[in-house]
Amino acid sequence: MSSADEILDIVDENDRVVGRSPRGEAYAKGLRHRCVFIEARDAQGRLFVHRRTATKLVFPSRYDMFVGGVVGAGESYDDAALREAEEELGVSGLPRPGYLFKFLYDDGAGRTWWSAVYEVRCELPVSPQVEEVAWYDFLPEAELRRRLAEWAWVPDGLAAFERLRAHRAGGAGDAPAGRPG
């Protein structure tokens, strides 16, 4: 089954399931669904940063400071976070990512999804999926910040990154509070 055929839960503005759709159709029709974003750090605290492959359905060849992806139909955010982190990092036995907050991403142009943000420490050697990741490295946070203006980043990842910075500073930026559904 191709990634475009993967079945997703379609959700409303309150993250309640209102239907199901193949991923490709959800993207084409701008149907709201669920995604997870996992900030992965190595033993030294450096951030996993990667460039997506040119074959990705959304934001091909863009850089991202998160691993993650869509939540499958009937799958919990927590289970999707662990699955996606292990798949994209190419590891097994990763600790369960810690949930931080959830927000509604909407670019105003038909791309909208509920986004649950997590963090995980990956002390295992990584071997990212070649279908997902064209380039990767663990970067110190200062270097990531320098690259923000230089590299073409995925817009949803940038939105999650800004909200994560606000969250860690003790400010707003996350909505609504509580565990994901």
Image (cartoon, rainbow, N blue to C red):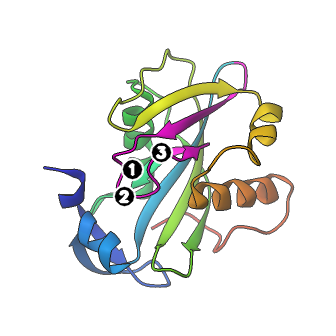
Mark 2 vs 1: CB contact within 8 A: yes
Q: Earlier in the sequence, mark 2 or mark 1?
A: 2
Q: Which residue is mark 3?
A: 61
Mark 2 vs 3: CB contact within 8 A: no
Q: Secondary structure at mark 2?
A: loop
View extreme (top): residue: 125
16 within the magenta span: no
Label 1 neighbourhood size at 10 Å, few (<14), some (14-19), many (20+)?
Answer: many
User: What residue is shown at x 32% (from left), y 80% (from top)?
Assistant: 29
Secondary structure predominantly adopted by residues drawn in magenta: loop
Please provide the residue range marked out in magenta: 44-67
Q: Earlier in the sequence, mark 1 or mark 3?
A: 3
Q: Which residue is mark 2?
A: 71
64 w.r.t. 169: above or below: above
158 w.r.t. 26: above or below: above
How far apart marks 1 and 3 lie (CA) works out to 23 Å
Q: Secondary structure at mark 3?
A: loop
Horizontal relation, residue 170 to residue 77: left or right: right
Q: Which residue is mark 1?
A: 80
How far apart marks 2 and 1 lie (CA) works out to 5 Å
User: What residue is shown at x 50% (from left), y 69% (from top)?
Assistant: 114
